[in-house]
Amino acid sequence: MILLKNAHVADYISGIDGEKDILIDNGKITAVSDKIEKNCETVMDCTGLIAIPGIFDMHVHARDPGQTHKEDLLTCAEAAAAGGITGFLCMPNTEPVIDNAETLKYIAEKAKSAKVKIYPSCAITKGQEGKELCDFELLSKAENFPSGGSPAIAVTDDGRPVRNSATMGEAMIKASMAGMTVISHCEDLDIACGGFMNAGKVSIMLGVRGIHRASENIITSREIDLARDLCEKVHVAHVSTKESVEKVRAAKAAGVQVTCETAPHYFALTEDMLLTLDADYRMNPPLRTQEDVDAVIGGIMDKTIDCIATDHAPHSLQEKADFRAAPNGVIGLETSLAATLTFLYHTEKISLPDIVRLMCVNPRKILSLREISIAPGQPADITLFNPNEEWTVEPDKFKSKSKNSCFKGMKLKGRVKYTIVGGEVVYED
Ligand code: DOR
């Protein structure tokens, strides 16, 4: 039994906004009230801390199987726990690609000993080659995994787009029949054409090939049009441009079933970071302009953007050493809440209920996972943080195997103090 004393519960789902004691027993929350007196093995003083339902990150590259020199499911889960994240969706661009039952079984087996809850997605197309659709029916049904393996809950070729529009449309129809969420990596590869940063003033100054914003915008438009025509749902990953935000806003107003996410780097940083010639500021889509940052923040504020995910994309120091040759991607699990607090909450752009909506409620809703809250009977998945503690990001201290953080060296305000998953304290600062 664990007793959390004097935590400020900020949970608009249970309707609680105030200082409470929380009692946890057998993996569940058993009581939430002003004062609980009980003899417990563990009593934690949470004075000054905010308690929210556990954060869920719907965009994580765990690199397992196949690229475990960058990360593995267990280190990824440790990094998540350190970032206050109690569950995540792992992306299928592994080696081999998650497009078959064997790989899903491997993940489920390994996830059993992970500190947080791991849900797999599978590829849209076999080998992420953009040609033949995976068997969504097979990969989504729990009865096909009798030994406890867990089925995929979403489909995505993330890391790449599905190049053929008809194939993407068919994926939307078949995924919906299988009860899975379609997540689209919006990039027109012909336009992106080997570029590695935003096409704009900085790419011109550096004399490097840029990725035009049209690359993202065109496929965002295509996915919206497909969803509209087919009356299906689509979730747009990592929105980074002003135009993408505008397109999703207009589509939602017109009743199209589109949702989207962004990542902290897109509301906190601009292409100017690339002037450092440091590949830790390179990701895909790339950092854009201040106008895009402002539009992304506007989209978060008016609910066009449904959630904040990390796109945690670990790469080794060696791989990131060469600015031009390095792969795209940045880690984010251990900074996402702190960056959100620093750049959105402390700047009075969003409130605590917004954080709960963006990081806890909407990701689960989009993936059709059970809603959680801080109330009796609920699973004890709780994130506790000090909103005012300042700290400097030192990637060397991260749990993640990789250190490619674009927030390195920055002072952030807000720090995760405890992460509780299934009634167990899986992280303590
Ligand atoms: O920057 C990125 N890195 N964007 C992606 O879409 C994929 C990811 C990766 O897997 O490294």
Image (cartoon, grey):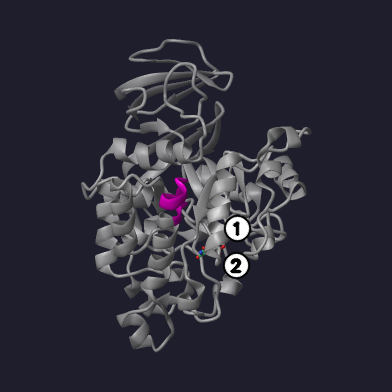
Mark 1: amino acid:
Lys
Q: Of label 1 and label 2, which has the lower sequence position? A: 2
Can residue 102 be seen by looking at this rendering? yes
Asked if residue 163 is positioned above or below residue 393 in the image, the reply reads below
Residue 179 lies in the magenta-colored region: no
Q: Residues within 10 Å of mark 1 (few under 14, many from 20)?
A: many
Q: Which stretch is magenta?
A: 226-236
Spot the residue most to the front: 229
Q: Is residue 78 visible?
A: no
Give me the disc on residue 316. Answer: 2
Note whether 371 is above or below 155 in the view shown: above
- Is residue 233 covered in magenta? yes
The residue under label 1 is 401
Q: Residue at x 63, y 62 (%)?
A: 70
29 above or below 417? Answer: above
Residue at figure coordinates x 33%, y 44% from the top left? 255
Question: Is there a contact, CB below 8 Å, between mark 1 and mark 2?
Answer: yes
In this picture, is 278 found above or below 294? below
Type of residue at label 2? Ser
Q: Mark 2 falls on what kind of element? A: loop
Residue in the image at 53% along x and 39% along y: 427
